[in-house]
Amino acid sequence: MLQALRSVRPFTHTRAAAFRPIRIAKMTISTNPPVKLNDPSLWITNPSFLDGQWTALPQHETFDITNPATGELIGKLPDMTVADTRDAIAAADKAFKTFSKTSPQQRANILENFYRLTLENKEDLATLITLENGKSKTDATVEAGFSAGFLQWNAGEALRLFGKVIPSAFPNTKSWTQIEPVGVVAALCPWNFPPGMVARKVAAALAVGCTSVIKVPAETPFSVLAFVELARRAGVPPGVIQIVTTDKHLVGIGEELCTNPLVKKVSFTGSTRIGKLLMQHASGTLKHLSMELGGNAPLIIFEDADIDIAVKGTLVAKFRCSGQTCVCANRIYVHESIYDKYSAALAAAVDKLVVGDGSQDGVNMGPLVHARAVEKCQSHVDDAVKRGAKILTKPRPKREGKLANGNFFDPVVLGDAPQDCLIADEETFGPVAALIKFKTEEEAIRLANNTDMGLAAYFYTKNQARTFRVADQLQAGMVGVNSTSISHPTMPFGGFKESGFGKEGGPDSILDYVQLKTVTVNIE
Ligand code: SIN
């Protein structure tokens, strides 16, 4: 590792001299994390990072971060302001002037270091993710590896980005294209995959020589700060990654990030409603945009599906991370001829899911992130039941002790959900599986596409012709056939329709962070 760090040291140190701290304060990193970490210095509570060092912001109000499994306070962070955001943007713009001139090899080295450090600290990252997001240890560990994957993928991408020589149409001239980083990137990141979503955006930005200002999710900041600390250790030069932690000033900060002329690109993951608002703000300065927005994924179980495989896939597509992913199946359409078999098998499998504090071994599903998420799930269940749906899963005992204060919502399978229930129309973002019967393939496709959203869609069939036919007709950016594993750093992730645009991950995602310049030279 030392060797790896040495390889980036000359670059980091000579460049560091060019970055002057904007705010000078004592460096104080708390060494008292509320959970056991292998490396307690990954617990960062002083999130100003303007000069590439963690510095305190003592004059700021703070906001609380709580453990969703118990309601207990995890820690407090400064509620940074619009003025702090402007400072962060200015520092990122200054850093861009030198970072954009680095070679692809230098950036690939940094990304590889960052990748290795993320893998080495995977357990600590997972512990922090579970502590503040609530997801199970297994889901959190997968996320830590997923975050590392974006660093590895983009380290490779950094080396394979080049323009073309174009045979000139004009006599005595030469023309070529060259690829240039777009500039300062504002990365507005959600709480459901805290380092995962930061990695998706920042790894691509680093690969091409962009600098970033990360709006850290208020609910889950500590795992993001730990990830940024790993970036610092990996040799990311001062100023290249900026962070803003906030709760109360979120709206003003979002607006600043989308209107400040120094920001050239906004990459947002979150709801369609907020995405539209940010686009309006960003239109004034015509920023490049990537919008990974809401989903309302259909999952179709055809009459020729392998039911065991379909049930296993449904557990992942619906209940992974307690149903809090944008690609979660929201509407499950089941052919009437296999409905009884599938619904009984799914309810039995869901009854076996262990719900509890995600940090405990054997727990499959943790709490939801907010109390209001619990209310939304309950309202979707109540609405469906009022319209005739039946709860197929068994009731579970009330939680006691510390967990009685957690944001838990026990997983539910709703049978015979009617087409006009709220869930058919609106993303639940929680562990509620609504089963709706259908009769024909044409009907299933029509129902699946009957939404403004188009992020993911899934179906199960053993019929090869149907596989191609249905995959072609589903209006979604990602389609899983007999599989719900549709998300990986090597695969383009992003939606159709009002689920947004721009792809994250995969071979073309890096192009969202660059611009193409055509140069024509008269050689007479
Ligand atoms: C999400 O963006 O919510 C889903 C992330 C993933 O599964 O990769």
Image: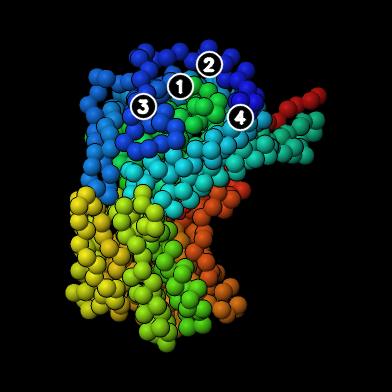
Q: Residue 1 carries which label?
A: 4
Of the image marks 4 and 1, the number of the one nearer the N terminus: 4
Instruction: Identify residue for label 1.
Output: 52
Of the image marks 1 and 3, the number of the one nearer the N terminus: 3
Q: Residues within 10 Å of mark 3 (few under 14, many from 20)?
A: few
Residue type beneath disc 4: Met
79 relative to 295, above or below = above
Q: Distance between the residues labelled 2 and 3?
A: 26 Å
Name the residue rendered at 48%, 45% in the picture: 144
Nearer the observer: mark 2 or 3; the answer is 3
> Image check: 124 left or right of 100?
left
Ligand 1 within 8 angstroms of badge 2 C-beta: no
Instruction: Identify residue for label 2.
Output: 16
Q: Residues within 10 Å of mark 4 (few under 14, many from 20)?
A: few
Residue 19 versus residue 56: which sits nearer the camera?
56
Of the image marks 2 and 4, the number of the one nearer the N terminus: 4
Residue 159 shows in the view: yes
- Residue 451, located in which quarter of the rendered image? bottom left
Q: Dot 3 lies on which element? A: loop
Q: Distance between the residues labelled 4 and 3?
A: 23 Å
Tell me, yes or no, whether the two marked residues, 2 and 1, touch with CB atoms within 8 Å. yes
Q: Distance between the residues labelled 2 and 1?
A: 9 Å
> Image check: 439 left or right of 157?
left
Q: Residue 31 carries which label?
A: 3
- Residue 341, located in which quarter of the rendered image? bottom left
Q: Dot 2 lies on which element? A: helix
Residue type beneath disc 2: Ala
Tell me, yes or no, whether the two marked residues, 2 and 3, touch with CB atoms within 8 Å. no
Name the residue rendered at 72%, 39% in the picture: 164
Q: How far apart are marks 2 and 4 (CA)?
A: 21 Å
Name the residue rendered at 22%, 58% in the picture: 399
